[in-house]
Amino acid sequence: MYVRGVGPRLAEMLAAKGISTAEDLLYHLPFRYEDRQNPRSLDELKPGEMASVIAEVRGSTLLRTRRAPIFELTLGQGRLAMKCIWFNGTYLEGKFHAGQTLAVFGKVEPSRSTSNMKMINPQWELLPDASDDAETRLLEVGRITPVYESLGGARLASRWQRKVLFNLLESVRGAVPECLPAAIIERLGLPNREIALREAHFPPEGTPMTELQAWSTPAHHRLIFEELFFLELGLELKRRRMRERAGIAFETDEKAREAIREVLPFHPTAAQKRALAEIVSDMRQPNPMRRLLQGDVGSGKTIVALQAMLVAMENGYQAALMAPTEILATQHFLAARKLLERSSRKYRIVLLTGSLDEDRKRANRGLINRGEAQLVIGTHALIEEKVEFDRLGLIVVDEQHRFGVLQRFKLMKKPRPDGSEDAEPDMLVMTATPIPRTLALSLYGDLDLSVLDELPPGRTPIVTRRVPDERAGEVWDFVYKQVKLGRQAYIVYPVIEGSRNDQPELDFSHDETPAAAQPAKSSSRKTHAKGKTADLFPKLAPEANPNAKSGLKSAVAMYEKLRTGPLGGLRLGLLHGRLDAEEKEVIMRRFQRGELDVLVSTTVIEVGVDVPNASVMVIEHAERFGLAQLHQLRGRVGRGAAKSYCVLMTGGQVSERAEERLNAMVRTQDGFELAELDLAMRGPGEIFGTRQAGLPDFRIANLVRDRKLLEIAKQEAARFANATPENAEGAEAERARVWARLREGWQRKYGLVEAG
Ligand code: ADP
Ligand code: MG
């Protein structure tokens, strides 16, 4: 379609920004709005308020100060004047000429030197002058003005977009087809598509600014709902297709039950029983199972999975368990082997990890290929890439807190001699990410969900405290005493070795790089200094810590320091990602067997490691870790009957967000609550990783902000998709249009890949 104002060259530039159709352009909404209905006159400005001012440029200078260049601009209205100041404003030099009309929007501040007001770093925009046409002037002043993110360069700036969009909206007046079912629009009281688009770009006079900035006007709601509705409809469709595929209908006869009873070392919790029942009921269906088993760290997911794998094995199929790390794969392998030893049946289990020697790997692959190994445990990569199974019936993916495997997962299929296709294996994904249930259900609409919302009995709450680095001495004393009481401890560092240039063991991608950390607020510093730790370490006086300088403490350096210093005489082990798998193994095994008292480590221990006697978790530089990571780390203790402790040590600057994370850790142990907070602080994209997790990049919607709408969209999508001819709402043609739009939009917009 031809859009006025967009020639071939501009079209190319737009396409580079993902805008390749007129529709894309229409859905490119302003990111904020300016109230230029009633721009303020300079004499009515009050300090502290946000205001929009339209005035004439009088002059400007770039002041080169010792710290940062300051760009200073004087605006005038008659005899009144106002200064605008931009720090680091070199880029503004030469942009303004006296006599131009400028709109600025910002916080009004009193000016020290004069009685006039000033604005610091205001938003600004040059307005058209008298020579511009009336239509353009109309879009800029005297109205609520949309402000767009620049699409690149001055040519595609906000002002240009305003004009193009205005023209575009005019040219399609009365011709924008509705894409949602009429019944839904009516039920939810939403504006139609054309009105919603028009009003989201050019809000009618009097629209409350607060609603606009929050994207909560009816127009916004309508457009957000539309996006979420098609997402949910697509998920619904995927789920239905999965139900239609051929899978394996496992039988759960007495034989299978007996096999489980033989190996189960304890009474399952009610939650474990319920989850297993849900899983087994799926497995009995003739379609492939796609189920997410969600349970906080320590909730006992592994045993549930093992039971499901026994069902598959008793049916004569192979089962595979894929773990994210070698340590975990090995741990699963050892645990499974120990349990299965109790069985009267002779199962063959093999391990597949990168560190096995080549001969061993080849031999194991042979066992799997010939169907002689019933249970295969290994790392994701190995199982995915190299293995052809003989009769794979169930895949369990231990994802811990990563996501997206389901979408990417592709197993090699062993060719059948007769060329026939195997039935799809069942799949169970285990995750410790406590995504809020509503979000999980809506996002993973193509998965079914089982939740372990109960911890095995005998767990005691973990006492969590923050301790400033200056009191490290007390912490080591405490660790020492706990070990003397027969306990074990973890001490975790963000880096392996060195300080600044070292590679972090895991990413710090949450919200700040070390360099960007902001100084703590004075208020939060107070909490910090008071240290809420008084009751955990009551007797000792603060002590200077030689490490509490600027650099990062590392696992390697601190291992040496602790071993020869405060923890001298205890048996310390060192674990990090640079050791080869065998070394890691040995250390881990020794810690598990109680031959080491203290494990100094990086976050390699984060996932799933299970040592019930370990009751102390010390995390240094706790401010560096993300909330999910901290929660995972803490989950390594509190697994036995002994009272457990988590000590979050911080030194130096703690950013505001880190402060929030640490306070949350102290406040609660509830994984779901922490997940909610994490989600609110970081947004789902950062947590789940958008593209790679198969999560859509939304044009308009935001999963945190729009959770209520997501729920409604899910309900409406299910209702629409599952309507029978008798109760379907709307005409056949309308329903066909909705499906057509889904097909057209789904692949392009979300890039979602079909599983398997
Ligand atoms: P996660 O869900 O974090 O993977 P695990 O499966 O590793 O948790 O289980 C944590 C610990 O709890 C293990 O030591 C496991 O043996 C134990 N456990 C699991 N279920 C029960 C139960 N019903 N009763 C007692 N202990 C259990
Ligand atoms: Mg686990």
Image (cartoon, grey):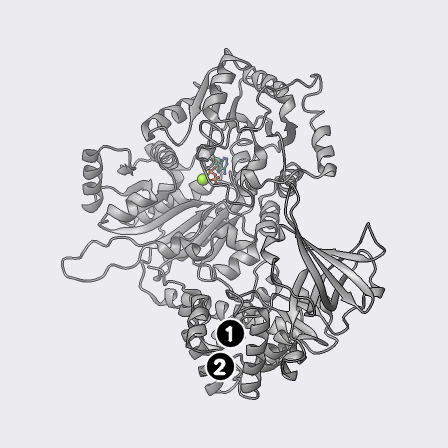
Residue that appears at 71% across and 16% down: 539
Q: Residue at position x 38%, y 45% from top?
A: 257
Q: Residues within 10 Å of mark 2 (few under 14, many from 20)?
A: some
Position of 634 relative to 435 (above/below): above
Q: Residue 511 occupies which quadrant of the picture?
A: top right
**Left or right: 295 in relation to 206:** left
Place of residue 647 in the rendered image (x, y in percent of width and height, measured from the top left):
60, 29
Quadrant in the picture for residue 74: bottom right
Q: Which residue is mark 1?
A: 25
Q: Is residue 159 above or below residue 481?
A: below
Amino acid type at circle 1 is Leu
Q: Residue type at mark 2: give it.
A: Val
Q: Is residue 731 above or below residue 664?
A: below
In the image, residue 121 above or below residue 482 = below
Discs 1, 2 touching: Cβ within 8 Å? yes
- The answer to whether the beta carbon of the residue marked 2 is less than 8 Å from any atom of ligand 2 is no
Q: Position of residue 125 (x, y in %)?
A: 65, 67
Marker disc for residue 3: 2
260 vs 360, nearest the viewer:
360
